[in-house]
Image (tube, rainbow, N blue to C red):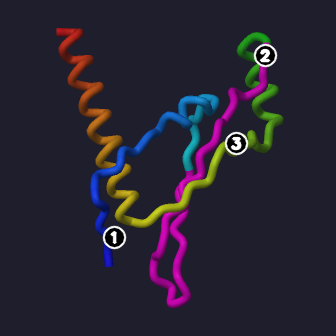
Amino acid sequence: MAIQLPKPLLVSWRPAMEMPVTAANSFFVQIVANGSGEPEEIVLNVGFLPPIPVWGDAEVQASMSAQLSEVAVQPIVRLTFSRERAAELRDILAGLVEYWGQRDREVQG
């Protein structure tokens, strides 16, 4: 049963403005099953994959790259949420991408 509030409450994201902004460029999604094997929640892993540490001319870079076996993602956060919240996040991001694309088309054209 939902709680009835006497008046709407304002939701503030103000404390988030005090958090540092961190670059993220790597994402990994997991689906967690419940006890009966049905999907129950989604885990979104967010990280930063730094540039491959090579330098020099193209030949030296190719040689150094060939010696690397892996480059580790630096984890930033693991978030868990329901399928419904995943759909909400998808819609928010899709709207943002559409807005950004429309803005770019207007500037170019």
Tell me, yes or no, whether the highlighted magenta stretch contains residue 41: yes
Provide residue 93's location: percent of width, then percent of height: 35, 41
From the image, tell me which residue sits under label 3. 73
Tell me, yes or no, whether the highlighted magenta stretch contains residue 89: no
* Amino acid under disc 2: Trp
Would you say 33 lies left or right of 95 here?
A: right
Residue at figure coordinates x 28%, y 54% from the top left: 7
Would you say 97 lies left or right of 81 here?
A: left
Residue at figure coordinates x 83%, y 35% from the top left: 67
From the image, tell me which residue sits under label 2. 55
Work out which quarter of the rendered image holds the N terminus and state it.
Answer: bottom left
Labels 3 & 1 near each other (Cβ < 8 A): no
Provide residue 17's location: percent of width, then percent of height: 54, 30
Start-end of magenta stretch: 28-55
Q: Quadrant of residue 24?
A: top right
Provide residue 87's location: percent of width, then percent of height: 33, 57
Pair 2/1: label in front:
1
